[in-house]
Image (cartoon, helix red, strand yellow):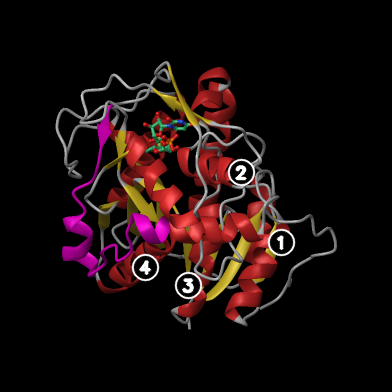
Amino acid sequence: MKTILVTGGAGYIGSHTCLALLGAGYRVVVAESFQNSKPEALRRVQELSGKEIGFAACDLRNKAEVEDVFDRFSIDGVVHFAGLKAVGESVVKPLWYYENNLSSTFHLLNCMEKRGIHLFVFSSSATVYGDPDTVPIREDFPLKPINPYGRSKLMQEEILSDFQKSRPEFRVALLRYFNPAGADRSGRMGENPNGIPNNLMPYIAQVAVGKRAKLSVFGKDYPTPDGTGIRDYIHVTDLAEGHVAALRCLEERSGMVICNLGTGRGYSVLEMVRAFEKASGRSIPYEICARRPGDIAVCYADPSRAETLSGWKARLGVDDMCRDTWNWQSQNPDGYPDEPTWKGSEKL
Ligand code: UFG
């Protein structure tokens, strides 16, 4: 049974991926700083899986701390989620973004190289495509991110690609996510943003539950059927399964794989509002506002390569995403509670 180190494993996508990995028979060790997440997420991963996970409190920018994780646990592969991800913040604090996001990857790769560990799955983003000339977006489209966050993702992809070329035994999957949404079917795990949500789905969910008065719809003058932006929303459980499929794929083949993880279908902001109203039975008041700087009109994936390479494809749709987000949000209106006593298991 392989042991997978999941960095940022208490985050939204990380925690759902831990659950999927445990379900698929992997052992899981989480390295976390809880900068943008809560220990309770990991407690719930254990609760839902009925399995124990290994845990290391770790700031990935600190090389010695990363070394320590690899010394304490016998790791076979890494799924790397940890990183800063707010587009607006990255414009204001670019150095902070580059330093955080790049140094973590360097430290992980150095530790892996030293110990002969060859499996790496990287959490990348559709943001690396910037504003695409056409849709659906294929993996061979030009890479032209338009903000420091996106460029930090592309730089990490390039570092991983160069490293792979220099070490043929190193196997890496670059997974470019479209727009994650939804929550675990149980309602026990979901997205738990700090403060005011940046993204559409958690914002809608907080309006539905009464925490925010109304949604601001950023622009109704895009060249789309209803004038609002179109995105490819993908259920977080499908996304999590995409990581398991990528690991399985890397176990079978050498080299580097690059895959979009999306559904191949786009929905507008107003379509998402209506779908959420239907799922929750609540009305979502909204007002039309100016466009958000840096937003693009339309973005959706051609996800066929992932299916060809690994057999993975998204199974769940927008109604599932809205139902599960509402289930999570209505059961946990304030997100995860603080759980200061949780220490995690230092051994596996
Ligand atoms: N939107 C609103 N109101 C809000 C929030 C969003 O109208 O309060 C709109 C946006 O204008 C956009 C759509 O909803 O049309 C989706 O916006 P999100 O912020 O949820 O997602 P983005 O597509 O902007 O960005 C997301 C991630 C990025 C990632 C990118 C990849 O946040 O990290 O997808 O395409 F890089």
**Residues under numbered marks 3 and 1 in contact, where contact means CB atoms less than 8 Å apart:** no
**Residues under numbered marks 4 and 3 in contact, where contact means CB atoms less than 8 Å apart:** yes
Label 1 CA crowd tier, 10 Å (few <14, some 14–19, many 20+): some
Label 4 CA crowd tier, 10 Å (few <14, some 14–19, many 20+): many
Q: Is residue 249 magenta?
A: no
* Magenta highlight range: 297-321
In the picture of the structure, the residue carrying the numbered disc 1 is 40
Comes first in the chain, label 2 or label 3: 3
Residue 192 in the image, given as x and y percentages of width and height: 62, 49
In the picture of the structure, the residue carrying the numbered disc 2 is 193
Is residue 201 toward the left or the right of residue 159 in the image? right
Three-letter amino acid code of the residue under disc 1: Glu
Comes first in the chain, label 4 or label 2: 2
Alpha carbon separation for disc pair 4 and 3: 10 Å
Image quarter for residue 345? bottom right
Residue 299 in the image, given as x and y percentages of width and height: 26, 36
Three-letter amino acid code of the residue under disc 3: Leu
In the image, what residue occupies the spot 16% across and 64% down? 308
Q: Nearer the viewer, mark 2 or mark 3?
A: 2
In the image, what residue occupies the spot 51% across and 24% down? 88
In the picture of the structure, the residue carrying the numbered disc 3 is 21
Comes first in the chain, label 3 or label 1: 3
Comes first in the chain, label 1 or label 4: 1
In the picture of the structure, the residue carrying the numbered disc 4 is 247
